[in-house]
Amino acid sequence: MKVSCSKAALVSGVQTVYKAVSAKPTIPALSGVLVETCPQGLRMVAYDLDELGIETFIPVTIGAEGSTVIPAKYFSDISRKLPQAEVVLEFREETQSVTISAGRADFVVKTLPANEFPALPEIPEASSWSIAEGELKTMIRRTGPAAAVDDARAFFKGIYTLFEKDSLTMVATDSFRLAYRKSSAIFNMDEPIDIIIPAKALLEVERNLNEAGEREVSVAVAENHAMFRIGTTTYVTRLLEGQFPNYKQVFPQNIPARIVCDRLQLLDCVDRVSLMCKDELSAIRMSYTGDEGMASGFLTIAATTPEVGEGREDIPVSMIGHAEVTVAMRARYLRDVLRVLDGEEVCLGYTSFKHPIEVTDETDPSYTYLLMPVTAPM
Amino acid sequence: MHIPEIVGQDEAVRLLDREMASGKMSHAYLMWGPRGSGKMALAKRLALASNCMQSAARASASGGPESGQDLPLWFCGECPNCEKIAKGIHPDVCVVAPEGDAIKIGQIREMKWRIALKPNEASIKTWIIDEADRMTEEAQNCLLKVLEEPPGDSLIILLSEDPGMMLPTISSRCHEVRLNAIGIEELTKWAEAEFDLEPERAKLLATLSEGLPGRVATLAGDDEYFKVRDRIISTVRRVALCEDGSEALAASEDLIDQLKKAYAQAVDGGGSPEVLEISSPMGACDLMAGWFRDLFILSITGDESLIINLDHIMDIREDAARGQPSLFSRWAVKAMQTAQALRSSANPRLAMDDLFLNLALHE
């Protein structure tokens, strides 16, 4: 195999697939990136057999056809540090090694056998749908952070995804907070399909989407896998087993009071006050002083750690409705949602100190984030 | 392609086959039995049989469990699933084994995450936990939930030599399958055919391995084991009845040294578990007990077919003529007691000295 391409194309190809390289490969070849000449250029694949398989194509000039598997770490490091010049990749069968050269730099890297590299699962694309890139990015970006990173219950590490005739719904929760977004999309299917997709896989797809982009993402779901294709890049993931908890019942009904405030101001305030928190999971307290009804007042946010001290700040807010607001919550969970919203203002729906707080943004009415308060004495 | 063969575990194989055919498979098995009894082979066979694409097709074509004249736990060996499982590269058939001394909680956490994903290709995801009794207590507790209710279609198989070392809550969640040592005759026949051995050699290996096919397979190509064994036997023969206390002590010191070297060498050079065992003081004492048992049996029955150390038959005849059965039986008991003491951390040198003085001074 011998191909040549620009450094930029090579780097972008390797970085696109790199996240899918297996950290603990069960087959040695999985610690590498498969490169293979084909009519579309150079096909690159990385696959961890579990959550993520990524395939992409980069434009190359083919000198000789062939395929090999290049150890991912070296491939990635070398390609990034190469001098700005045309890159030549040449695989030598006799020595089972690949030469990577650019300008006056030359690397010879031992390769792994390409025939041991497992094929990506084939997902019939006959029934694939398409979603606008920006919309999918928003869906994942706003729901993803609520998924658990480390939980015994695997379905909390996934994002529940529901395809219906005219909508796409994504829900993620780690049981302390829940993010829900329903967007209109035309799928034209007879029966709704609901699946749980590992959050890690979706967040990797999201990373390569562009909010202002105009591309369409093609999505296909098979019995055990889901596939996302953007341009020439394809992501494949295994779905999670299990039943997603009935999330609908946790949405509070008849919220008596809503506090509206400037989103960035609140985020800055939480950031500052939580300096006095002991750790990521410590709570901050929140209370409202001022008039009720359609009125304005102040939201006081405070954090106390007995052996350290206390932080406190007021921000101006307006209150719609009636309630005596005093509630405690984990700062990180509030920050997470404030960071992924775009609107200037954010609305906190308050029912009582033990009901979930509902965080919404007027500019994105299809989105709801629920945050469980901390009820333990503080 | 090498398909793991199961020798002599007919009962276990038939039991599993019946359960599979009648759709009553458990989702968790504990396969236990001595080292070399074929636990891993049986676990892989179960994975093969339950994932073979042909097997599923046959079962549905013939319409029910009663129709099969096939071998129990049949698999085709040719479909992609069979091929990958046999090669050990099937993405949905995974093995967890101790990393270092133990199976740690991190390994079980990772397994729990991966088993929660839907299968890649298999119809039944299969997770084999080898040497399951070496799970740390945290790891075992972490496993409990998933063992009780594995997600989706999955099968968890624990393998253990000593299931008593595990929490009772683990074994109570598993369907137990016991693997036993098998008859020497059957094993001899198998060894003859499998490793192309002379009948006598095959019988020796079958006897030495105590009826365990896995150990026969190791011994068949293990010269180092026989070197260590010969060294122990020649030392014992020299010491027994020599009536010289100081020579016995010198021989004990020498043997302990040699065993240590052999053991270290086996550890460094990736020696077989058989070499590791026989070059431990306990293993050496077990071998001596066997030797004295041979002397005893021959001197009271004269029946050479009952002898374990067949390759040394001339030596055994010679030694058996030199003493009384009661003496040999006392020695055998003493050797076993010494092995027992060593297992409870007795000082090897002192224990061996004591044993050898007994031999030399015919007590």
Image (cartoon, helix red, strand yellow):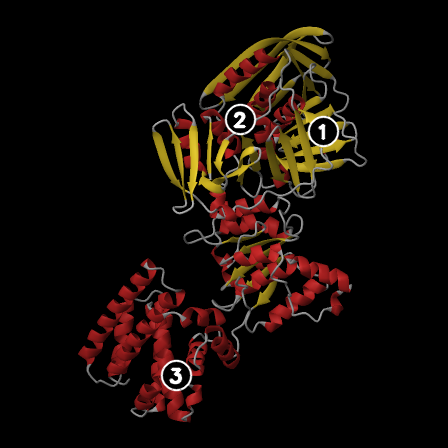
Q: Which residue is drawn at 36% across and 82% down?
A: B311
Q: How dense is the environment of label 3, judged by Cα within 10 Å: few (below 14), some, or many (20 and up)? A: many
x and y percentages locating residue B310 in the rendered image: 39, 83
Q: Residue furthest left?
A: B246
Using the rendered image of the protein, determine whether residue B72 is visible from the camera's viewpoint: yes
Quarter holding residue B31:
bottom right
Looking at the image, tell me whether mark 2 or mark 1 is earlier in sequence order: 1
Amino acid found under the numbered disc labelled 1: Thr
Q: Residues under labels 2 and 1: Cα distance?
A: 31 Å
Residue at figure coordinates x 74%, y 17% from the top left: A256
Up the image or down, B329 lies above or below A337; here it is below
Which residue corresponds to mark 1? A169
The single residue placed furthest to the front in the displayed view is A63
- Residue marked by disc 2: A282
* Mark 2 and mark 1 on one chain: yes
Quadrant in which the C terminus of chain B appears: bottom left
Q: Mark 2 lies on which chain?
A: A
Which residue is under mark 3? B310
SS for dot 1: strand
Q: Are the residues flagged by discs 1 and 3 from a single subunit?
A: no
Quarter of the image for residue A212 reads top right
Amino acid type of the residue that numbered disc 3 sits on in the rendered structure: Leu
B3 shown above or below A315:
below
Q: Mark 3 lies on which chain?
A: B
